[in-house]
Image (cartoon, rainbow, N blue to C red):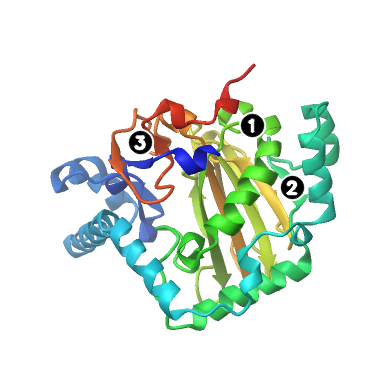
């Protein structure tokens, strides 16, 4: 039995107060009270163009709505999941269950090497293409035919009457894969059986050996919807970002430095998106997406989490987490050390 079967996962209570994104000002903020918010951000917001009292009131309203949404998130997500299961009929039911035939031969070769008893980081790097950004790796993940069927399934769901939640505060268009039913049969085996062998070698210093939960979603960029994604870091120890299609021009990712390094001291590197291929990187590695100039792009994002790491320090508030109960994988924190994967111990 894996740790996923036994652990109760929790959320840090900072989820409702920290890393609230103000899209109009490309700014992440913290909100505990209006007094605190004014002291911390009023002068900065005025410099960014929030100059009238009405504009500031609009900001406060948006923040209040987002805090309320987050407080109700677990219940509303459970309601959506039940409604989707009741009303939605999949176009391609087989894509909900991972099969090895969906995976690119090169990816299967890489995973087999990592599973071997004589695997090494140097040997793995010979099989990977390292990007200009430090410790960002590109490799084929899926066959093109599978990507096409998965996008068809996602578009079919989009057109349905089933309720839909947004992936996060920065992506307005996309699908939460756990609500659609992808976790158990697809994302969990992908993480456990195929990705963890890679992350164990590549990222042992940030939980790569003990990834025991995840949040998976797809995001969509379209000329009439979201075009790009602001500079940010992920609520994850390790992230996989796979380009699923369709036809698009530009929209490269760009990577800076780790979140502790100010942008003013950072030189960013562009990384091209290629359909069927994935980019693997540390969650705390600052990055963003440049605008597409035409077409439409779908991306599969898997935020992989290691409770052994985040139990010590919440990656979002940089404090020891104060835990509240959550549903499913929640935000990947655990209370019981025995629930953590014993293979996490570094030797």
Residue 339 picture location, percent across and down: 45, 32
Residue lying at 48% horizontally and 69% vertically, measured from the top left: 173
In the displayed structure, does residue 30 sit left or right of residue 81? left
Q: Helix, strand, or loop for circle 2?
A: strand
Task: Compare marks 3 and 1 and give the one earlier in the sequence.
Answer: 1
Say whether residue 169 is visible: yes
Residue lying at 21% horizontally and 45% vertically, measured from the top left: 37
Residue lying at 75% horizontally and 61% vertically, measured from the top left: 102
Task: Compare marks 3 and 2 and give the one earlier in the sequence.
Answer: 2
Distance CA(mark 2)–CA(mark 1): 15 Å
Residue 192 picture location, percent across and down: 62, 43
Task: Compare marks 2 and 1 and give the one earlier in the sequence.
Answer: 2
Distance CA(mark 3)–CA(mark 1): 22 Å
The label on residue 317 is 3
The quadrant in which residue 283 appears is top right
Q: Are marks 3 and 2 in contact (CB under 8 Å)?
A: no
In the displayed structure, does residue 56 sit left or right of residue 279? left
Q: Helix, strand, or loop for circle 1?
A: loop
């Amino acid at each position: 039995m894996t740790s996923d079967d036994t652990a109760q996962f929790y959320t840090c209570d900072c989820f409702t107060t920290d890393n609230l994104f103000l899209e109009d000002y490309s700014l992440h903020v913290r909100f505990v009270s209006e007094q605190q918010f004014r002291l911390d951000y009023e002068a900065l917001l005025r410099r960014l163009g929030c100059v009238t009292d009405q504009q500031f009131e609009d900001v406060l309203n948006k923040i209040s709505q987002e805090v309320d949404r987050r407080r109700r998130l677990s219940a509303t997500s459970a309601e959506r999941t039940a409604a989707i299961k009741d009303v939605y009929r999949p176009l391609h039911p087989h894509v909900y269950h991972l099969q090895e035939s969906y995976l690119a031969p090169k990816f299967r070769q890489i995973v087999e090497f990592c599973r071997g008893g004589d695997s090494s980081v140097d040997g793995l790097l010979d099989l990977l293409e390292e990007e200009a950004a430090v410790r960002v790796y590109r490799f084929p993940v899926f066959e093109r035919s599978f990507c096409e069927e998965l996008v068809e399934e996602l578009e079919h769901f989009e057109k349905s009457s089933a309720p839909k939640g947004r992936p996060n505060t920065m992506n307005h268009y996309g699908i939460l894969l756990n609500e659609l039913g992808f976790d158990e049969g697809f994302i969990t085996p992908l993480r456990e059986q195929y990705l963890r062998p890679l992350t164990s070698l590549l990222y042992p210093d940030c939980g790569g050996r003990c990834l025991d939960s995840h949040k998976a979603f797809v995001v969509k960029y379209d000329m009439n919807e979201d075009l790009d994604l602001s500079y940010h870091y992920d609520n994850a120890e390790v992230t996989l970002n796979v380009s699923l299609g369709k036809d698009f021009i530009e929209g490269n990712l760009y990577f800076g430095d780790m979140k502790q390094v100010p942008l003013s001291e950072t030189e960013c590197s562009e990384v091209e998106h290629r359909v069927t291929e994935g980019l693997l990187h540390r969650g705390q590695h600052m990055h963003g997406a440049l605008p597409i100039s035409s077409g439409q792009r779908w991306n599969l994002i898997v935020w992989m989490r290691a409770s052994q790491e985040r139990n010590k320090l919440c990656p979002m508030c940089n404090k020891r987490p104060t835990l509240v109960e959550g549903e499913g994988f929640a935000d990947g924190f655990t209370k019981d050390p025995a629930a953590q994967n014993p293979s996490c111990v570094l030797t």
